[in-house]
Amino acid sequence: MRAMAAMAVVLWATAAEAAPNAASWREAQKLTAEAKALEGRGRTRQALEKYRRADKAMPRIAVKLAMGRLNEGLGDLLAAAAVLREAAEARPVDLGERRAQIEAKKLLDAVEARSASLSIELAAPEGAEVTVTIDEREVEPKEGLPLNPGTHVVAAQAEGYAPWRKTVTLPEGGEKTVHVALVREAPAGEPAEQADKDAPAGSVPRWSAWTMWGLTAASLGVGIGYGVTAIRATRDAQDAHGCADGRCPADAEDDLRAAKLQGNVSTAAFAVAGAAAVTASVLTYFAYRKPPAAEPAADHIEARPILTPGFIGLTGRF
């Protein structure tokens, strides 16, 4: 009697388990048939949703394969790879499932070969919490982030720093690296018109480089002009006073002194031009350079030219 009772319990449990499985199987079959009909009419997204519901009701490798193909056709290679990977790792229950799994593995290899990847190198400001997003989806900055081929928007932000944004286009199977370096926002209360819109915050303002190149050109012009004038004045004085072999009479001294003064002005102008050119080159380098990825955004370069009657140079923090 006890054996019969135990057998009855087992049979009851088996029947109870088989009942929902049979219902799930019928539901999956119905949804799969509807999905195929939608797919035949070109209604890909609606068919994909039906396949998803069928796979949820009763997971099947063939259904996952169908989902992978539809996702690939829609250009969503990441979704295709995810569902095809599930199909490749599933356990086939019959010969048909085994064949579907072989096809899923082949398609998975092709999809992964077409997928793109993006590496994000972040120069994180010390003590700042930086949020990085790709297409408004938060991600962890690292190498080899898988993405679908196409155009993506990478953005980063942190409190106290100017928002950073860049558009990146990835070809099929392509790999790119994006360097993210945040810069501090302008201090509170600073007039907006004083900011250099062409240069990132904390860098050398470009107007200072332009100013120094202007001073270089002006000094060269003065040097050349006074130099030519000094040569002519010396020759005129020597001719007027009958100088010979570099010797001139005493009455030529005033004219020669005036010519020498013009020569000294020319020499000084050339010296100023040389110093201005060096300073302008340094300013231009820092004003137009792109910050390297390894350079923390908290490290800023501040520089400005110094112009005095007896000195020309550059001061700041590097």
Image: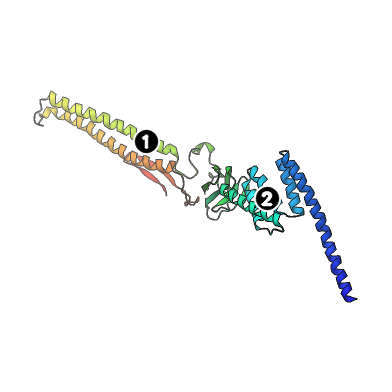
Q: In the displayed structure, does residue 53 sit left or right of residue 123?
A: right
Q: In the displayed structure, does residue 41 sit left or right of residue 150?
A: right
Q: Residue furthest top?
A: 240
**x and y percentages locating residue 62 in the rendered image:** 70, 51
Which amino acid, mark 1? Trp
Which amino acid, mark 2? Leu
Quarter of the image for residue 232 reads top left
Residue 158 seen by the camera: no
**x and y percentages locating residue 12 in the rendered image:** 86, 66
Per the rendering, the mark at residue 213 is 1
Residue 77 seen by the camera: yes
- Quick one: label 1, few (<14), some, or many (20+) residues within 10 Å? many
* Residue situated in front as seen by the camera: 180 or 97: 97
* Mark 1 residue element: helix
Q: Quadrant of the N terminus?
A: bottom right
Identified at 69% across, 48% down, the residue is 66
Q: Is residue 219 above or below residue 103?
A: above
**x and y percentages locating residue 74 in the rendered image:** 65, 42
The colour scheme used to paint the residues is rainbow
Q: Residue furthest bottom?
A: 2
**x and y percentages locating residue 283 in the rendered image:** 40, 42
**Residue on which disc 2 sits:** 65
Q: In the displayed structure, does residue 107 sit left or right of residue 191?
A: right
Q: Is residue 25 above or below residue 152?
A: below
Q: In the displayed structure, does residue 276 sit left or right of residue 122?
A: left
* Mark 2 residue element: helix
Q: Nearer the viewer, mark 2 or mark 1?
A: 2
* Residue situated in front as seen by the camera: 163 or 92: 92
Q: Is residue 216 above or below residue 186?
A: above
Label 2 – label 1 distance at C-alpha: 66 Å
- Quick one: label 2, few (<14), some, or many (20+) residues within 10 Å? many
Quarter of the image for residue 286 reads top left
